[in-house]
Amino acid sequence: MDIFVDTADLDEIKEAESWGILNGVTTNPSLIKKAVDNAEGELSLEDHIIEILRTVDGPVSLEVTEIEHENMVNEAETLYDRFDDINGNVVIKIPVNTAMGKDEDNFEGVKAIKTLSESGIPVNCTLVMKPNQALMAAKAGAEYVSPFLGRIDDYIRDQMGLTRGDDYPKGTYYPSELTEMIRNFHMRRRISEQGPEQVVYKDKETMDLFAWGNDDGIVSGVDLVWSIKNILDNYSYKTEIIAASIRTARQVRQCAEIGAEIATIPFDVIEEMMVHYKTSEGMKAFDEDVIPEYKSLLK
Ligand code: G3P
């Protein structure tokens, strides 16, 4: 699995690059804002982006800001023409659906993906929250689709009345297995108390129970990645998955088990992937046991 770092912070990108395991970078307007605030004007934004592109020999996603098809395509072409010559690694990030309200057009994103892909500009389709969105982005020619794991976990928790905050800070694991166990427990109890013939699809309480703790059948961010992987494999789409909005090293491991091609990971979570208590403990023991004769052989 390729590892991208999900940041626009140059120090983080350079450090991750020095580890020798970095394959790319993803940015978005929020990450650019954070990086520019932290850098306190050391470089112009243009030079900052150029430095990112030079640092990494792999895809670097830059996002558009417009929401209509033609405007997105214009911005994407401007970004691509301005920056791709630096290191040949610009990928344009297009939201799968730019509608922010009910009456807005839901297909501006895929239209832009289609136009850009046909003209040879690689697209990373972002803000993917459901498998059908990924399917349509793949059909439109997206090179990458980015399902947002952490935000789907947040959303499901919200629907269950468990809002993120002090109780569920950003890196909290979302235990979808537990949710399913609780749902199954209540379902079994309903069936045994009322008999299976009463627990039918028209029964509102049963339907509410089915909908509890999932988003139209998707039980977690990791489950979203699993579903998208199956769909893309079923039809041999070349589109690759970038698992995004990652909050924990456990999610990275689960995405690797599923076979997601790429995970874009915050810097601190990449560090978390490398740390284990028993590794440090083992290192201390080895270090204490080095005898001088052995050390002298190594000089
Ligand atoms: O790659 C998308 C990512 O930057 C969003 O992450 O944690 O804000 O949902 P998050």
Image (tube, grey):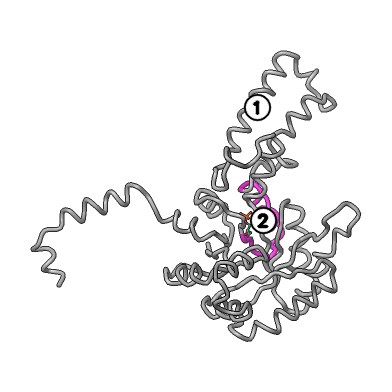
Q: Name which quarter of the figure residue 18 lies in.
A: bottom left
Q: Quadrant of ligand 1?
A: bottom right
Instruction: Residue under label 1, please give it.
Output: 184
Packing grade of label 2 (10 A; few <14, some 14-19, many >=20) is many
| In this picture, residue 17 sits left or right of residue 46 | left
- Between 235 and 20, the one lying in front of the other is 20
Q: Disc count in the image?
A: 2
Q: Where 169 falls versus 41 (above or below)?
A: above
Q: Where 206 falls versus 131 (above or below)?
A: above
Q: What amino acid is found at the position of numbered circle 1 in the picture?
A: Asn
Magenta-tinted stretch? 222-242
Q: Position of residue 204 (x, y in %)?
A: 82, 26
Residue 237 is covered by the magenta coloring = yes
Q: Name which quarter of the figure residue 168 lies in.
A: top right
Label 1: state its secondary structure. Answer: helix
Q: Position of residue 110 (x, y in %)?
A: 80, 65
Instruction: Residue under label 2, please give it.
Output: 147
Residue 248 is covered by the magenta coloring = no
Q: Position of residue 257 (x, y in %)?
A: 53, 52
